[in-house]
Image (cartoon, rainbow, N blue to C red):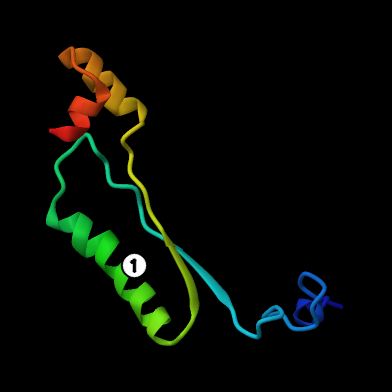
Amino acid sequence: MAENNSDKKIDGNSSPLGDRGFKRYLITAALPYANGPIHIGHLAGVYLPADIYVRYLRAQKRDVKFVSGSDEHGVPITIRAMKEGITPQEVVDK
């Protein structure tokens, strides 16, 4: 017989929603590549949909964290900087 996980306690609380009575959301977006040009596909396919969803959840009074970042410290940036004889920061700033 399969075990029913819906009745298990989370962090000692009887509700799977925690002690606040609501879910928490963590939304992330893909890292933009700093070593290539940004194009409309980045905006339309990655950042805008995530931003819209986060704004929707916040309008619903949900507990939301939206995390993103960049690829500024990645290996491709370092390699390109070495080939061009400049610093990684100069590659990113172009």
Q: In the image, what residue occupies the spot 47% across and 72% down?
A: 64
Q: In the image, what residue occupies the spot 87% across and 78% down?
A: 1
Left or right: 93 in relation to 33 = left
Q: Residues within 10 Å of mark 1 (few under 14, many from 20)?
A: some
The quadrant of the rendering that contains the C terminus is top left
> Which residue position holds label 1?
50
Front-lying residue, 4 or 61? 61
Q: Percent from the top left, x then y, of residue 35? A: 22, 34
Left or right: 14 in relation to 61 = right
Three-letter code, disc 1: Ala
Left or right: 89 in relation to 16 = left
Q: Percent from the top left, x then y, of residue 46? A: 28, 60
Up-down relation of residue 73 to residue 5 (above or below): above
Up-down relation of residue 10 to residue 43 (above or below): below
Image-quadrant location for residue 4: bottom right
Q: In the image, what residue occupies the spot 30% across and 27% down?
A: 76
